[in-house]
Amino acid sequence: MEFRNDEKNFYIVGAECFSLAETLDCGQAFRWSEKDGVWQAVVGNKLRRISQEGDTITIFDCDKEEFETFYTPYFDLDRDYGEIVKAVSQNEVFMKAVAVAGGIRILRQDPWETLCSFIISQNNNIPRIKGIIDRLCENFGNKTCGGYTFPSAEKIAALSLEDLSPLRSGFRAKYILDAARKFASGEVSSDRINALSTDEARAELMKIYGVGEKVADCTLLFGFGRIDAFPKDVWIKRAMAVLFDGVLPECAVPFAGIAQQYLFHYARMTKLTF
């Protein structure tokens, strides 16, 4: 990949193993939307806009400093996904999967936002997840150009269950509140999780009321960059049993979380059923 910029925009040229559509619409993030070929979302404290034509990605209103400090970690640009695709393709199933879904990259999102979003995702569908998150941001985030920021754990921790009623999030409200209070108080902290092994970090996140293994693993993978985390929902468990006798192929183990995304997206795109 080559990186270029002009007075307004930044460009990724020769983007290998990088599809914006696959990456932003595969279920790891819930605030991105696409219109007329441009993807946009409020991420952090500002509206981000980005598009792709062939192997060239345009990041609008971005300078070199912002590209290096935000977009490089956010899109995991320091990781060689070409080598990962080559490694997992030693297995026939994954060879087929990367032919369909090899453009997925693992986003490195804000840990608190990731945790809260996947708490909301439990037993839920994508449109409703996005609706709850939109209402959360509109009610408790800060207004910025193009939308609202994701509210901090501290902001949510100061609220009551009644305050959260406009979200219409059902049983998840009490989980959101407990997560916010534990994050805000430091009882569960990003710094401590970063210092722990993946197994220990999973246990740390599961101290939060309503957070099970799947939500914890999604948070570790999409919020902390732990690519050895392997979120398992009912569908993935069935796929693993049918395709791999329940055991991830050895070639995919070092990249388990990325492999999971290839597998999930491949099945969705090809309408596999189990």
Image: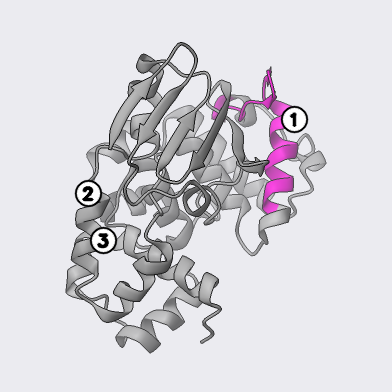
What is the quadrant of residue 97 in the picture?
Answer: bottom left
The part of the image, by quadrant, that contains residue 37 is top right
SS type, badge 2: loop
Residue 212's place in the image compared with 29, above or below, is below
Instruction: List the single residue furthest toward the top.
Output: 7
- From which residue to which does the magenta span run? 129-154
Q: Earlier in the sequence, mark 2 or mark 3?
A: 3
Q: Amino acid at mark 2?
A: Ser
Cα gap from disc 2 to disc 3, whole angstroms: 25 Å
Mark 1 and mark 3 residues within 8 Å of each other at the beta carbon: no
- How packed mark 3 is, by other alpha carbons closer than 10 Å (few <14, some 14-19, many 20 or more), is many
* Amino acid bearing label 1: Glu
Using the image, tell me which numbered label, if any, was put on residue 85: 3
State how many labels appear.
3
Question: Which label was assigned to residue 138?
Answer: 1
Residue 141 screen position, x and y as percent: 67, 25
**What label does residue 197 carry, if any?**
2
Horizontal and vertical percent position of residue 122: 60, 60
Label 1 vs label 3, nearer the camera: 3
